[in-house]
Amino acid sequence: MSPPDHALPNRLSVPTDGERVWRNHMIMAKLGATPKGGVCRLALTPLDIEAHCLLARWAEARGFTYDLDAVGNMFIRRAGSEPDLPPISSGSHTDTQITGGRFDGIFGVLAAFEALEAIDDAGIVTRHPLEAVVWNNEEGSRFYPGCMGSAAYAGVLGLDRVLDTTDRDGIPLRREVAALRAALPGAGTRALGAPIGALIEAHIEQGPILEAEGKTIGIVTGMQGNRRFQVEVLGEEAHAGGSQRRYRKDALVDAVAMVTALHGVFHDPEDIIRFTIGRFEVSPGGLAVVPGRVFFTIDFRHPEQSTLDRLGDQVEGLCRAAAKSCAVQVTEISRSAPVAFTGAVPDGIARAAAAHGYAYREIYSGAGHDCRYFADHCPTGMIFIPCERGISHNEAENASPGDIAAATQVLADVMLELAQRR
Ligand SMILES: [Zn+2]
């Protein structure tokens, strides 16, 4: 990243309303509020559709238009003076994890909407249109994989594959996208993949660094790549009393050996490798039955492609070597390359943060986010704010009104500047 030019003249700025953006967060947090203070609003459930409808009402009250694309992404637009120019867009997601918090995703949507409102309040007509975007199904907690809407928009996932995805009850995404469209009769249609002029995503850090260092703004320099696998270990069910150990094909015994072997390889002294077995299912699950099948998942992330290649390519061999009596099937279910954010967006964030006197630093994103798919298509970047003790994907997730206001101000400034560019 080139050093930000803090001395650049004519930096544009409009005042944003920190109280308004906080109020909107608290209104949104009621949609799916959990007893422990979090939010459960899974993608395209009635609650998530209600969140889209609320945004649509706010947009209508402002005279902003809104469109849906074929996979259920929503684009709230404030027109510019040159309608043929691609929009300067910002957004994130309204869906949450099952035990999600009040800020993950929705902060990026509401900050973007506030930027549009603030620029509207200031009466500025921008050259480029401005957009607040809601990417569909970011969390992947109902429909797998996550970041589905943004991936489809960027052409990383095929349209039919996305629409045919089903949730655990067998409900296809296609049906829920139709339900979203039916709930938003005022929505226009956006072509999937239509050009975007620049994309900025504001998000909570989901880690402890900014809070620990007393920084308000994180300028995200990049995102880890990842590889995901599922492993199926097939043994043979047997009577826990009748079967001798030497004749057993115990899927759990082999699976545990695989997990041990994998953990032995997937670590580094610098503690950069992220390796997680987040799902581990033993079947049939009878107290007196030797397990005949184990299914587990692997999530592996790293900032460097060479490490993703070198270690990821060992998963299957390690599992096969650890299998003593069972068959094993290893399937790679997704992979993403590492992403670097450079240029206009991170430079603009640094300039705006400095101009307002907010403490900031560069930061690397451990989590994946929707905007990753756009870094090769248009100027792209992210603004992080601290979240309390780094806790996220948790009902206790918290962020401060002051940090939200600050990042919203920075976002509005960056969007305005990009939208006036020649
Ligand atoms: Zn998120």
Image (tube, grey):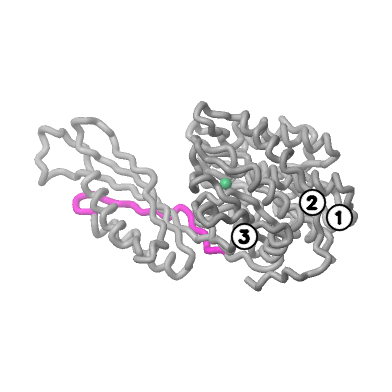
| Mark 3 crowdedness (10 Å alpha carbons): few <14, some 14-19, many ≥20 | many
Residue 226, numbered label: none
Q: Amino acid at mark 1?
A: Thr
Q: Report the front residue among 178 and 117.
A: 117
Report the residue at 38% width, 66% height from top: 270
The stretch in magenta equals 323-339
Q: CA distance from mark 2 to mark 1?
A: 8 Å
Mark 1 or 3: in front is: 3
Q: Nearer the viewer, residue 296 or 174?
A: 296
Mark 2 sits on what residue?
130
Residue assigned mark 3: 360
Q: Which secondary structure is most common in the magenta stretch?
A: strand
First in sequence, mark 1 or 3: give its number. 1
Q: Residue furthest bottom?
A: 2
Q: Are marks 2 and 1 in contact (CB under 8 Å)?
A: yes
Q: Nearer the viewer, residue 331 or 367?
A: 367
Q: Is residue 340 above or below residue 368?
A: below
Q: Is residue 379 left or right of residue 393?
A: right
Can residue 362 be seen from the camera position used here?
Answer: yes
Q: Which quarter of the picture shows residue 72?
A: top right
Q: Is residue 332 magenta?
A: yes
Return the mark for residue 126. Answer: 1
Q: Secondary structure at mark 1?
A: loop
Q: Is residue 61 left or right of residue 342?
A: right
Residue at 50 percent across and 42 percent down: it is 393
